[in-house]
Amino acid sequence: MAILLSDTYKQIHNKIYPKGLTKLVSYWTPRRSMLKNQNKMVFFGLQAFIEEYLIDYFNKNFFELTAVEVEHTYKYSMDIQLGNSYDLEPIMKFHKLGYLPIQIRAIPEGTLVPMGIPCIEITNTHPDFAWVVQWIECILQVELWKPCAHATIGHMYRELANDYYKMTCDDFLRPEMACSDFGMRGMSCMEEAVRCSSAWLLSFDKTSTIPAIDYIDTYYDACCWTKRIGIGAVSTEHSVMASNYAVDGDEITFVKRLLTELYPNASFSMVSDTYDYWNMIDNILPACKKEIMQHNGKLMVRPDSGDMVEIAVETIEKLWNTFGGTVNSKGYKVLDPHIGIIYGDGCTLNNVKQVWEKLKKKGFAANNIVFGVGAFCFSAVIEPDGHIVVVTRDMFGIAMKATYGIVNGEPIMIYKDPKTDTSHLKKSHKGCCCIYHDDNGELQCMDGFNDVFRDGVLRTVFKDGEMYHKETFEDIRERLNGGNKDE
């Protein structure tokens, strides 16, 4: 039941707020980045959360239930949790109201938000339900912080791709094709995998997580078919390579079969280190040169172990020596279009940058290799100095704090400022906030107002059970990185 989607303590705060509280205003804010070189967070995921939970889930699993069902289900869980230390009346009154009496205003999704700038403002629209504002914190946090983190990580890879494509590739090549999401199997559940890949697709066109296509089509009108978002790839795995080896007694037979029988007119990637990777590169592929060059597509060799920087660069040099290629408009070597490499193991930001930098120094363009970014890279960020930052809600210090209220008709300023918090991380805003762009286009926040500020960049996205200002996926992509343009 929707009203039970919270921590225990949220269920009793309706009783212990000040008597006469008729208004509460809260802000959801990234407070401080744990990353040394990334001080802005990509804001993403609110629209899907609103439609999936605040509208569909709440209607089906709360407002459309009978009063008897609500009372029975609520009492069952809360009797276990708190005995008789809770109040059923506010819950039944909420259910009878029939809609979620809050207003949510937010920064547009796809915005790069500096630390300390609130992304979301929530306030109640009915004087009897001020407590609902902070009740929503748990479900909002658990559904939203990680898509923001994953969208930010994807943007970091995209910025890296932008840089090296601009330096070494022909201008018509698109950096959003440089990396793909390979993280599905390493996520904690299917929901996380889908949300992660959806966030990734803000910056890149490629993923191996198929359900992400339906998710962004459903909640963001992505039009994946027409926009060509969510591109996958034909690819082998070790079980395929090893089982064919068990039948053929060699590897070359299956390589030729892939090229001439199975996929004569399609590009594919082939995991190549099931046994002896360098034998594949040095002997088997040269022996298949005729079939490769006559193949109507690209064979992508895929190393899957070892030192990815060393192996990737050496592989490209060897493939160049075997299959040749051309020199592009910027003077960098590009492999023949029938052959290439994809790496899907250990593709951290540091490793990807090292590969592209070494290739640049050796005169090779960045588009000679593509990367499959796995779950580790969405779970931890390795910084240039080797420091590992685990991806948690604390990575950007995200918190939702009440900052303003009205009690018995009088405004109150609400804030926290713990003296023991010497880092001042936990100091909150005070009063209502105005979020605006300064003369340089940077987001700024002024607090201390005694009413919700009507100007600024916040806009209403939800009110009393209805969604407002719904945007498409392309709108959000354009805001973040210019859609399909290399900026």
Image (cartoon, rainbow, N blue to C red):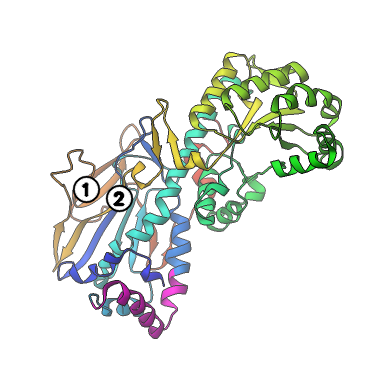
Please tell me which residue lies in front, 79 or 135.
Answer: 79
Above/below status of 194 relative to 41: below
Q: From the top left corner, tell me how far across and down residue 209 is, in percent.
A: 60, 49
Above/below status of 144 relative to 299: below
Disc marking residue 399: 2
SS class, disc 1: loop
**Is 74 in the magenta?**
yes
* Residue occupying image coordinates x 86% and y 25%: 290
Q: Residues within 10 Å of mark 1 (few under 14, many from 20)?
A: many
Q: Which image quadrant for residue 286?
A: top right
Q: From the top left corner, tell me how far across and down residue 384 is, in percent.
A: 42, 26
Q: Which image quadrant for residue 362?
A: top right
Residue annotated with mark 1: 428
Looking at the image, is mark 2 or mark 1 earlier in the sequence? 2
**Is 165 in the magenta?**
no
* Residue occupying image coordinates x 83% and y 24%: 287
- Magenta range is 58-84
Marks 2 and 1 in Cβ contact (< 8 Å):
yes
SS class, disc 2: strand
Q: From the top left corner, tell me how far across and down residue 231 is, in percent.
A: 65, 44
